[in-house]
Amino acid sequence: MKINLFIAFSIVVLTFCGSCNIYNPAEPVPAYIHIDNITLTIADPSSAGQGSASSKISDAWIYVDEQLIGCFQMPCTVPVIGSGNHVLKIKTGIKVNGISATRAPYPFYSDYTQVVNLQPGATTIIKGATVTYNPYLTGVAHFPLIEDFESSGFNVDSTHDSQTPLVRVSSPAANVFEGTQSAVGSLRSSNYVFECSSIQFYPLNKSGAPVFLEFNYKCNHVFDVVVRGNTMSGSTITNTALVGALSFNPSENWNKEYLYLTPAISNLGNASLFKIYFRMINPEGADSLGLALDNIKIVQ
């Protein structure tokens, strides 16, 4: 009897709950935000102080009223619960070291902010979103090295160890990323090493604050970026060591890289001055190997 009463009671409860909207409230209808892309603009194009506007912003870290909605690869259409005016903020995201698993907001790009009017079921399209270089801690984004290979001077050149020179080229067009010139290093079957580096040593952040190397490149063979650290005592400079920052695989088309230099700098101990090297090795005596570079800049 008790079992039958329990079954009967359960049926009554389930029937009641199934017809009661209190336990199944209607799902809210989201509004949508669509973002195609975000581009970089140089604050003062007439000044060479920030170099090229080349960028590779892959992701949008989206905030609504300072609440993080998530990180989304662009182009993206993102559902948001809300209506009326809200503050949209987008932090521009990159693939650190070109690796998809290390996506992060780039600390040297400003946020994009806009007031949006959200309507459930409707899509707000963000057009023409641009960012600039953003101050980081020190008050300004600082560029110790900028080399776009357009001026007569050299900030990056082949080293004494290189068996082939770094050559400025203006043609074919495929070897020029932008402007009128890029730079190319090549190896024939009789050459073992091509190497170029910054002419100067630069004092770079060692406090843990981020340091990035930006550059455009294309190549048909693996190459390495290497950091050399030096110490200075009075007017005497002493070489310390070379630390490999990262190896890069061949890229048939021009690519943009954001290389995080901070770990390599930290691994150089007491060094206070740093040089950046690009190195291609040819141990198998292959022919017609090449590396094209443009818009090299250190940002800190």
Image: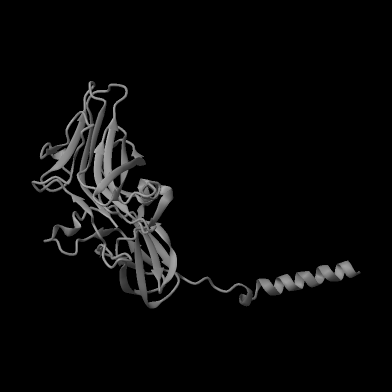
Q: Is residue 185 above or below residue 43?
A: above
Q: Nearer the viewer, residue 39 or 116?
A: 39
Would residue 51 be visible to someone looking at this image?
yes
Residue 129 at x, y = what percent? 26, 64
Looking at the image, which residue is at 26% across and 25% down?
192
Q: In the image, 227: left or right of 176?
A: right
Looking at the image, which residue is at 24% across and 45% down?
216
Outermost residue, right side: 1
Number of callouts in the render? 0
Q: Nearer the viewer, residue 27 or 149?
A: 149
Q: Is residue 186 above or below residue 234?
A: above
Q: In the image, 138: left or right of 17?
A: left
Residue 84 at x, y = what percent? 38, 78
Residue 99 at x, y = what percent? 39, 46
Would residue 252 be visible to someone looking at this image?
no
From the image, which quarter does the C terminus lie in? bottom left
From the image, which quarter does the N terminus lie in? bottom right
Outermost residue, left side: 152
